[in-house]
């Protein structure tokens, strides 16, 4: 008669694996190890972690179309790399679902422009809820010169004069319109991007926000008025948003002269996503490996 209870150890409390279960587990582990060995006996390189692009999400359908196009551009730049998309909220696939369906390892690259609550809390929390997956969270996209490349190109597309002379630079300025955050690190990152763009254009660039959560933050109309009071009557609004949406539209509507499109699927954005992915992988490989001897001394 087949026993109905599982095998137990001598204490009678912990189930022991049957011979069949034990052999299945050993075979599975051996098979996974053999996939790393080629036919000539040399160890194969482990597969690269997947790149998970983490978007915020938006009710505007243009945002999902834009982010999807950007992900496709990343795939085109690195065809052998597994690239997935996950959203923090509002759009599918949600990040938690993307991670639940993944296997192996992944680098989560925020499609966000600075440090803030989503980067510091929401994304790491989602990664922690996928313990089956080896994950690493990359830095946000900004600040970085590649973002300035994209911002500059979008302004040129909107009509910013490429041959702005000395006289023109005395009357022109740019408002860098961003979403806004309560985190002071986010504002620091936005100001740094504004400084980099000012160096590129040779005119003042003032950060302003669609959501003025900090007492000292300016919204876009207030920033335009402040620049006009300084004699800067040709003020453009540079859209510091990754995709179209309510905030981007609201900021563009406040432009007295011209307003650029969101960063979108600009080639520099795709290159920057891959750059942050590579940075995170390099950081992981450079981290000291904890050996059994070191563990014993901890």
Image (spheres, helix red, strand yellow):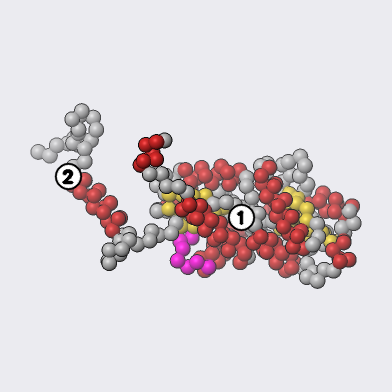
Q: Is residue 121 above or below residue 196?
A: above
- At x 54%, y 46%, the residue is 123
- Please indicate whether residue 284 sits to the left or right of residue 226 in the image: left
Q: Earlier in the sequence, mark 2 or mark 1?
A: 2
Give the number of the disc on residue 19: 2
**Residue situated in front as seen by the camera: 136 or 24:** 136
What number is the disc on residue 141?
1
Query: Magenta stretch?
Result: 77-87
Frontmost residue, 60 versus 87: 87
Give the side of residue 109 with respect to residue 221, left or right: left
Could you tell me which residue is drawn at 53 percent across and 56 percent down?
Answer: 279
Residue depicted at x 61% and y 58%: 63
Q: Residue 167: x percent and y percent?
A: 88, 66
2 or 1: mark nearer the eye: 1
SS type, badge 2: helix
Cβ–Cβ below 8 Å for labels 2 and 1?
no
Binning the other alpha carbons within 10 Å of mark 1 as few (below 14), some (14 to 19) or many (20 upward) gives: many
Which image quarter: residue 162? bottom right
Instruction: Determine the image quadrant of residue 17.
Output: top left
């Amino acid at each position: 008669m087949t026993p109905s209870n599982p095998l137990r150890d001598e204490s009678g409390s912990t189930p022991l694996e049957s011979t069949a279960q034990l052999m299945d587990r050993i075979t599975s582990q051996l098979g996974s190890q053999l996939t790393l060995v080629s036919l000539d006996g040399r160890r194969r390189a482990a597969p690269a972690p997947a790149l998970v692009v983490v978007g915020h999400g938006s009710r505007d359908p243009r945002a999902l179309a834009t982010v999807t196009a950007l992900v496709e551009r990343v795939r085109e730049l690195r065809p052998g790399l597994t690239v997935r998309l996950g959203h923090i909220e509002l759009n599918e696939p949600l990040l938690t679902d993307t991670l639940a369906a993944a296997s192996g390892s992944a680098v989560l690259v925020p499609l966000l422009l600075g440090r803030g609550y989503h980067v510091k809390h929401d994304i790491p929390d989602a990664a922690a809820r996928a313990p089956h997956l080896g994950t690493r969270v990359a830095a946000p996209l900004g600040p970085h010169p590649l973002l300035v490349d994209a911002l500059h190109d979008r302004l040129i597309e909107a009509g910013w004069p490429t041959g702005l002379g000395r006289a023109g630079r005395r009357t022109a300025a740019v408002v860098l319109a961003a979403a806004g955050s309560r985190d002071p690190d986010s504002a620091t990152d936005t100001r740094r991007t504004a400084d980099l763009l000012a160096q590129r254009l040779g005119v003042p660039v003032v950060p302003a926000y669609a959501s003025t959560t900090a007492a000292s933050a300016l919204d876009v109309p207030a920033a335009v008025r402040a620049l006009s009071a300084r004699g800067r009557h040709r003020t453009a609004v540079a859209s510091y948003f990754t995709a179209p949406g309510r905030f981007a539209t609201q900021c563009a509507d406040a432009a007295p002269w011209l307003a650029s499109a969101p960063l979108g699927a600009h080639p520099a954005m795709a290159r920057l996503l891959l750059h942050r992915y590579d940075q995170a992988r390099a950081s992981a490989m450079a981290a000291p490996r904890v050996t059994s001897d070191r563990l014993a001394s901890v």
